[in-house]
């Protein structure tokens, strides 16, 4: 089955009771049991309910995995997988990891004796050097936020297998339509389904997909024990969003490519970070593991003052945090997603003072380009 068909197949159904094409919203926290001795499939909705299960099967199918789990947010999903670790365990994490993940690793897990090191994942030797006897996990995020650094997923998996480590990949930035880390040998894929999967800036959601039954059992145990599950209503909205994932990603990434190429030739833009550009340092690596450059790009307008002028002049994009929606969103990472980093840390991550991140939505690409040109004209 090709991906566009797979998406519709995964997100629609034939309800056995009514024939409904859309998954019924089963608002019930508890379920009647058949008899004193014979319990049915569902008992209490935190442990499982038919709506969430339909969503979990859908996300598993999209990521070409066997077992899917839905959480209340991306951070709930990421935290829940990290809860499978024990005191004394060590994690090696891509240096450009999402800010919320950084916070859990830095400020929560060390209290429980779980430690980490941040490593530049484009440097494979550095990963190997950082491995300690107590290392358990290599944590990948590619493309990274907001500088669109690329990690060679297959190469990291190879290192992990050699040292018997688990690999986790945050696949939020590309969605399962453009990249499938499980196919490349990754053990656990995680998503902020708030972004492209849901796609409409309406809900918060997180997803985890694995192939290994033992790992699946561990994650299910934590999902049920901790209880950060996705609500029934939000699961329904997520399934609704997923139905158009393919067409949204195709449109948004084609516009992003066009915008990235346009900005690359713009005198007011000193740098464009987008893995769909042939001159991106890791273009070949990226294209060997993903379908295209994705729908997010970052560009540098030289200074914070210029960034302010551009943002204030733009008419189409929403100026906000988050990404992966039908509307184009522009954000200023140093003051938004990466506000916790000091000036030195920002520079170390490649987040220059003039850097703007653009998550391209479904508006006409030429309208977006005209809007950007009008705004950029003010700083030339
Ligand atoms: C947004 C995001 C998260 C966190 O997800 P929430 O749904 O906001 O909790 C994790 N990873 C990446 C790459 C993200 O963009």
Image (cartoon, grey):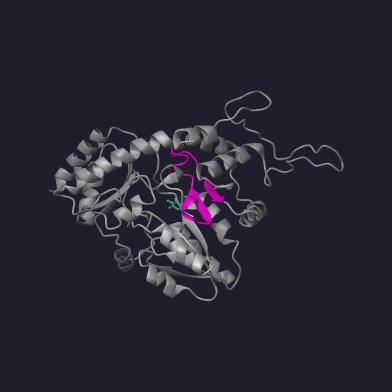
Using the rendered image of the protein, determine whether residue 49 is visible from the camera's viewpoint: yes
Using the rendered image of the protein, determine whether residue 317 is visible from the camera's viewpoint: no
Tell which residue pokes out farthest to the top in this image: 18
Rendered location of residue 143, percent (x, y) = 37, 54
Rendered location of residue 25, percent (x, y) = 62, 32
- Residue shown at the point (39%, 51%) measured from the top left: 289
Note whether 332 is above or below 237 in the view shown: below
Tell which residue pokes out farthest to the right in this image: 36
Rendered location of residue 44, percent (x, y) = 72, 43
Q: Is residue 244 left or right of residue 225?
A: left
Note whether 330 is above or below 344 in the view shown: above
Q: Quadrant of residue 236?
A: top right
Q: Is residue 208 magenta?
A: yes
Q: Quadrant of residue 126?
A: bottom left
- Residue shown at the point (38%, 59%) measured from the top left: 151
- Residue shown at the point (28%, 32%) measured from the top left: 364
The number of callouts visible is 0
Rendered location of residue 178, percent (x, y) = 40, 44
Which is more toward the observer, 122 or 29?
A: 122
Note whether 118 is above or below 230 in the view shown: below
Q: Is residue 41 left or right of residue 5?
A: right
Note whether 116 is above or below 370 in the view shown: below
Residue interval drawn in magenta: 183-210
Q: Is residue 9 magenta?
A: no
- Residue shown at the point (33%, 41%) measured from the top left: 253
């Amino acid at each position: 089955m090709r991906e566009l068909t797979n998406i519709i197949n995964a997100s629609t159904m034939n309800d056995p009771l009514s024939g409904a094409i859309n998954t019924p919203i089963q608002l019930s926290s508890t379920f009647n049991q058949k008899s004193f001795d014979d319990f049915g499939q569902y008992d209490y909705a935190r442990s499982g309910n038919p709506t969430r299960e339909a969503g979990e099967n859908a996300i598993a199918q999209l990521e070409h995995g066997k077992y899917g789990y839905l959480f209340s947010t991306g951070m709930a999903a990421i935290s829940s997988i990290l809860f499978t670790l024990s005191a004394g365990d060590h994690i090696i994490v891509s240096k450009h990891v999402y800010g919320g993940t950084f916070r859990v690793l830095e400020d929560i897990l060390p209290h429980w004796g779980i430690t980490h090191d941040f490593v530049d994942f484009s440097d494979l030797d550095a990963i190997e050097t950082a491995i300690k006897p107590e290392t358990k996990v290599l944590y990948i995020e590619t493309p990274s936020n907001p500088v669109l650094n690329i990690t060679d997923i297959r190469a990291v998996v190879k290192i992990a297998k050699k040292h018997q480590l688990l690999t986790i990949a945050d696949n939020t930035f590309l969605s399962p339509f453009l990249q499938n880390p499980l196919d490349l040998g990754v053990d656990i894929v995680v998503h902020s389904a708030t972004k492209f999967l849901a796609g409409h800036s309406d809900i918060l959601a997180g997803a985890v997909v694995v192939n290994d039954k033992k790992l699946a059992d561990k994650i299910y145990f934590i999902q049920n024990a901790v209880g950060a599950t996705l609500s029934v209503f939000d699961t329904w909205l997520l399934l609704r969003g997923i139905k158009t994932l393919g067409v949204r990603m195709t449109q948004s990434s084609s516009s992003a490519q066009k915008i990235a190429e346009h900005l690359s030739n713009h005198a007011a833009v000193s740098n464009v970070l987008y893995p769909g550009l042939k001159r991106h340092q890791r273009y070949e690596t990226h294209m060997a593991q993903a379908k295209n450059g994705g729908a997010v790009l970052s560009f540098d307008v030289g200074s914070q003052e210029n960034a302010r002028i551009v943002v204030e002049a733009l008419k189409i994009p929403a100026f906000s945090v988050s990404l992966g929606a039908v509307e184009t969103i522009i954000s200023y990472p140093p003051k938004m997603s990466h506000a916790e980093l000091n000036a030195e840390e920002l520079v170390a991550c490649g987040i220059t003072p003039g850097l703007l991140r653009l998550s391209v939505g479904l508006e006409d690409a030429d309208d977006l380009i005209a809007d950007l040109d009008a705004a950029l004209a003010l700083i030339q």
